[in-house]
Image (cartoon, rainbow, N blue to C red):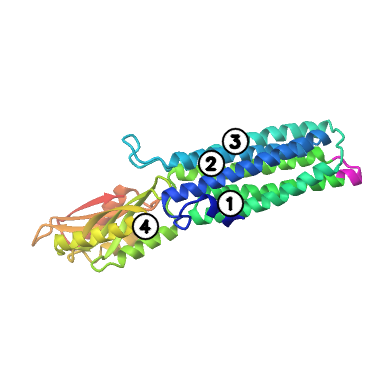
Amino acid sequence: MTELLIRAFIKNSERAGDLAVRSAYGKLAGKVGIVCNVLLCAGKFAAGVISGSLSISADAMNNLSDASSGIISLVGFKLSEKTADREHPYGHGRYEYLAGFMVAALVIVIGAELLRDSIIKIVKPADVLFGILPVTVLSVSILVKLWLMLFYKKIAKRINSDTLRASAVDSLSDVFSTAAVLAALVISHFAGINLDGVMGAAVAVIILINGIKLVKDAINPLLGKAPSAEMVEDIRQTIQGYDGVLGMHDLMVHDYGIGRAFASVHVEVRADMPLVECHDIIDRIEREFQKRGLNLTIHPDPVFSETPPALDGIMRGIDERITVHNVRIIGSPTPKEVVFDCVLPQEPALSQAEIKEQVTKQVQESLPDCEVVIQFK
């Protein structure tokens, strides 16, 4: 069914990396989710009213929230298609993240309201009518949500969408919550125990937990989360695979939406390398990453053969986590300055002033009267 929908509604579906095709996938997922959840909401709401079951009505509201989420996601994918303009030079890709955040907020609000109503139902229980309609509606809902979960997962994997991964997780949680409501309905009828309010509260708690998780997942890229270790290692291996590159450091990645990532990095090359050769290497690296959808800007750092041999050892003695880059010795034949970049860990053992004092003292043991200039990062 999923492949049939993809072939019917998405042109050039095999080119999932293309931003226009990716948006088409997202919009298809949103439309399918809206239709399925609206139908399920209508069926459950009717069954809840007829049977007098709050837990079924709560499950219907859960589907209504999912339909609303689909609408917001659909709008998010549509807005993220907009090209860059004067006010937004990096495009509008983060609309997708904003949509995910709005979905999460809506889920939490609905969960809180359902929990309130369920507590009231526990305190003041009411009879629930057992019948074929609620059992049938809940059973069909479980099957539809299972299919939706698989549908979202397949498209999320194809276009690498956190929003659709969240929708897949939400659909799976709906399967469990609906199954619990169905079980409570059957148990209440045959065992004579009214579990409607309790099960309604359980569904509400599930909705709240999912909403909190969705908020966390949605807010991380908006705050500027660090690139994954896999991405950093891929960039490192690619860059250091070029002849003439001695190393790299100070990698920074900025995420403006899927397919709209920008990055900068310092690449170490020999200080005596001709400028034209250096430019050619950097240009080839940048073009390769451009093809991958990463806009990379490279700053070349010259590495001098006259680097004081004890400098790395000095830093390791202070804090093994400190790294040193871009070392230059200025002044010849007698060095006047030793200049370098020092990358500190999140919580260094010493202050910057203490580090500079210790480094200067040890460097001057081999290079008297030499000034040490450190750029901390």
**Which residue in the structure is indicated by mark 3?**
106
| Residue 193 pos. (x, y %) | 88, 42
Asked whether the residues under the numbered discs 3 and 1 touch, taking CB atoms below 8 Å apart as contact, a structural biologist would say: no
Span colored in magenta: 188-194
State the mark number for residue 292.
Answer: 4
Asked whether the residues under the numbered discs 2 and 1 touch, taking CB atoms below 8 Å apart as contact, a structural biologist would say: no
Give the crowd class for mark 1: few <14, some 14-19, many >=20 residues within 10 Å: many
Give the label, 3 or 4, closer to the camera.
4
Asked whether the residues under the numbered discs 3 and 4 touch, taking CB atoms below 8 Å apart as contact, a structural biologist would say: no
**Which residue in the structure is indicated by mark 1?**
152
**Which residue in the structure is indicated by mark 2?**
73
How far apart are labels 3 and 4 at the CA level?
35 Å
Q: Identify residue type, mark 4.
A: Arg
Q: Secondary structure at mark 1?
A: helix
How far apart are labels 1 and 4 at the CA level?
25 Å
Quarter-wise, where is residue 204 in the image? top right
Q: Does 301 sit above or below residue 197?
A: below
Q: Earlier in the sequence, mark 2 or mark 4?
A: 2
Q: Identify residue type, mark 3.
A: Leu
Side (left or right) of 74 relative to 225: right
> Observer-nearest residue: 7 or 278?
7
Asked whether the residues under the numbered discs 2 and 4 touch, taking CB atoms below 8 Å apart as contact, a structural biologist would say: no
| Residue 367 pos. (x, y %) | 16, 61
Q: How many marks?
A: 4
